[in-house]
Each structure stands twice: as structure tokens, then as C-alpha cells.
Amino acid sequence: MSGLIGRKIGMTSIFDENGKNIPCTVIEAGPCVVTQVRTNEVDGYTALQLGFDDKSEKHATKADLGHFKKAGTSAKKKVVEFQGFEENYKLGDNITVEVFSEGEFVDVQGVSKGKGFQGVVKRHGFGGVGQATHGQHNRLRAPGSVGASSYPSRVFKGMRMAGRMGGDNVKVQNLRVLKVVAEKNLLVVKGAIPGCKNSYVIIQK
């Protein structure tokens, strides 16, 4: 799927032609530089490697600097491969937010906000161990029994328990593009997308 790398700016809302208030997310999408062109002859598949967001040379390895020098661009913080571009881009070309059009649907992938170590009520929606009766004064948010009987004498894999929550790769599909602001490289999509403000996201057509 073709697409771009972007940065989540934040959420806002706009009114449609019927006066309905629509929640939406603003994304700084591109411009992205083609840093490598994958071909069937060399790599066994066709794809474009895109780079987004400059970083200083002192924070880049020499291998990175040599790689980006071939494309005639500075070192990039985020590099992602995309497939399925209709146009034939060459090394060093810039791809802007104009590859998207208003009204089409996109998928947005990002890393969800980290919540830290959470219990089963917040993490999995458990109801706790009954009411505060029969001596259960401190069991309102407990997970309850997790083990089985003497057979198999263990806890099954995948048991829903307390643990680290968030920080996962999440893809939200079929978000409608409401606006494309080409002069500011902004993309406005309907609804929420994963990640905190200023986090990187991958937008796919």
C-alpha cells in the first residue's frame, strides 16, 4: 500500500456542510524523500523507502550518512518502506501530501500511548470480586482465581492479568480524509489515531 510518513499534531473538530461537528485529527504528512528504490532484479520485490524528519549529522552513524548521501538528502529520523505507488519515483524525489485527496479513506498506524503497569479492571475491563461483603474489604479490583485444578496445575498462556498496558503498534482503518492543506503539508482525517502528540505515524492509502 502506498502512503507517507507523518507526525501527529493533535485533535480538533470541524463542521461539515450540514452543520454537524466532526472530531478529527491533524497530521503533518511529509514531505518524504525517496531514500532507496527496491527492484525485482536486486531485491526480489518492488518498493520505495521513504525518509521523514531531518536529524543532525552528529546523531547519525556513518552508514546512515552514506545511505542518505546517495539520495542527495540529509539524515532522516524515520524510514519506512511503501509499496504500490502508481507513479515511478526516482532516488531523491520528494513525495508530498498531495498524493492524498479529500474524501478518500486511509489507514493510520502508530504506537499507542503507554499507560504503565495497570490492573485487570483498567486493562481488561474486569468487574472485581463481587461486592464489599463477606469479608472482601480489599478485593474490589482483584482478578479472582487464575489457576486450574490439580490438573493441569498451571496457569494457561494468554490468561488476562495485570501488566504493562499501551505502547503497542495499532492500526486504525478506513479513516476519511476531510482536508488536504498542501501548502502546510497537513492532512485532516476523521476520528482519532493512535499515539501521543508529535509521535510518528504511517498513513497508507
Image (cartoon, rainbow, N blue to C red):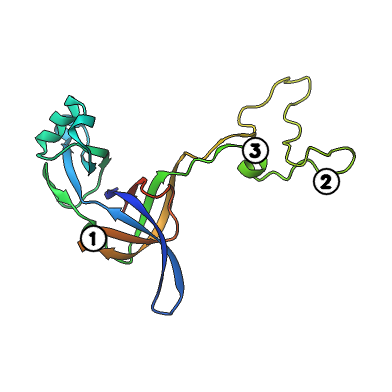
* Mark drawn on residue 131: 2
Q: Residue 175 location in percent, x, y?
A: 40, 59
- Among numbered discs 1 and 2, the one appearing first in the sequence: 2
* Residue that carries the numbered disc 3 in the rendered image: 119
Depth order, front residue of 186/48? 186
Kind of residue at disc 2: Gln
Label 2: how many Cα within 10 Å (few below 14, some 14–19, many 20+)? few
Residue at x-position 33% and y-position 66%: 103
Q: Residue 19 location in percent, x, y?
A: 44, 79
Q: Residue 21 location in percent, x, y?
A: 46, 72
Kind of residue at disc 3: Gly
Toward which corner of the image does residue 53 lie, by quadrant?
Answer: top left
Q: How many marks?
A: 3
Left or right of 44 on screen, residue 158? right
* Residue that carries the numbered disc 1 in the rendered image: 184
- Whole-Å distance between the Cαs marked 1 and 2? 55 Å
Element type at marker 3? loop
